[in-house]
Image (cartoon, grey):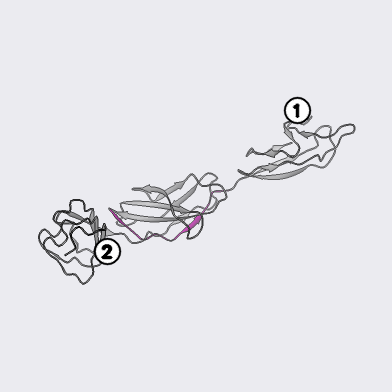
């Protein structure tokens, strides 16, 4: 008999137990009870008085368990999710995580961490889908994803971690002498989300000094100071 009122919300029944006697698990605080093999013999009212119990778990693949015991539903405990994959730079705005449909899962939780083996943060909870889109992924940042299957209150072991990232876009920033300047054109590459420090004075004109950068070929209006931070994620010629 499981001690009445004992603390704890889950209990794994030893495999040596063959009979759960009447009221053997009655009036406990348990939410879930886990069995590791074939169902034992359940005497009448074995779980009587456990109105808060969420479920009885048994190993996935067993077919000898009834759908419920004393009104408490039974669930196959899911094995680990397989074939988890994450996109690697195929999108500039997101990472797509996919996995194989699980035989007994009713829902999935997708986790993301910033490093291999790091803290897993819940990204999404899904039902009826084996695809998760991480729209919060920062371009170029590599993340580690894992998936856990649920069947009722019972969770599978975590899947293996897979790495994924959103594409880091780059933009060309060109420098040209324009209509009146002298000097060789050149270019730089701006990375998405990262400021680019603009060049200083690199062009000359007799009787003038370069004091900034213009997006107009005649340099009539100064749009940026020399050495300014260019923040816009777009190609430009100055």
- Side of 216 relative to 204 (left or right): left
Where, by quadrant of the figure, is residue 24 drawn?
bottom left
The stretch in magenta equals 153-167
Mark number, residue 221: 1
Q: Which residue is drawn at 76% across and 41% down?
A: 199
Q: Nearer the viewer, residue 177 or 192?
A: 192
Q: Is residue 101 visible?
A: no
Q: Give the image location of residue 177, x and y in percent.
A: 81, 37
Nearer-N-terminus badge (1/2)? 2
* Disc 2 packing (10 Å; few <14; some 14–19; many ≥20): few
Q: What element carries label 2?
A: loop
Give me the residue at 69% from left, 39% from top.
229
Q: In which quarter of the image is residue 206?
A: top right
103 is higher (above) or lower (below) than 14 = above
Name the residue carrying label 2.
Answer: 61
The quadrant of the image that shows the C terminus is top right
Q: Does the magenta stretch include residue 16?
A: no
Predominant SS of the magenta segment: loop
Specify few, some or many for label 1: CA neighbours under 10 Å numbering under 14, 14-19, or 20 or more: few
Disc sitting over residue 195 in the figure: none
């Amino acid at each position: 008999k499981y001690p009445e009122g004992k603390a704890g919300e889950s209990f794994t029944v030893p495999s040596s137990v063959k009979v759960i006697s009447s009221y053997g698990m009655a009036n406990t605080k348990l939410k879930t009870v886990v069995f590791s093999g074939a169902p034992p013999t359940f005497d009448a009212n074995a779980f009587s008085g456990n109105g808060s119990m969420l479920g009885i778990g048994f190993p996935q693949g067993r077919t000898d368990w009834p759908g419920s015991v004393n009104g408490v539903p039974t669930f196959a405990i899911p094995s680990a999710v397989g074939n988890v994959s994450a996109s690697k730079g195929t999108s500039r705005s997101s990472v797509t995580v996919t996995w194989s449909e699980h035989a007994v899962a009713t829902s999935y939780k997708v986790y993301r961490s910033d490093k291999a083996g790091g803290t897993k943060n819940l990204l999404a909870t899904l039902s009826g889908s084996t695809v998760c889109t991480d729209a919060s992924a920062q371009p170029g940042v590599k993340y580690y994803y894992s998936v856990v299957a649920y069947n009722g209150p019972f969770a599978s072991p975590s899947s293996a971690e897979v790495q994924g990232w959103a594409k880091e876009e780059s933009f060309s920033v060109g420098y040209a002498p324009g209509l009146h300047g002298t000097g060789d054109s050149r270019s730089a590459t701006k990375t998405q989300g990262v400021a680019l420090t603009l060049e200083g004075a690199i062009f000359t004109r007799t009787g003038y000094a370069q004091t900034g950068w213009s997006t107009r070929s005649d340099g009539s209006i100064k749009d940026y100071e020399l050495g300014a931070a260019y923040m816009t994620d777009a190609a430009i010629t100055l």
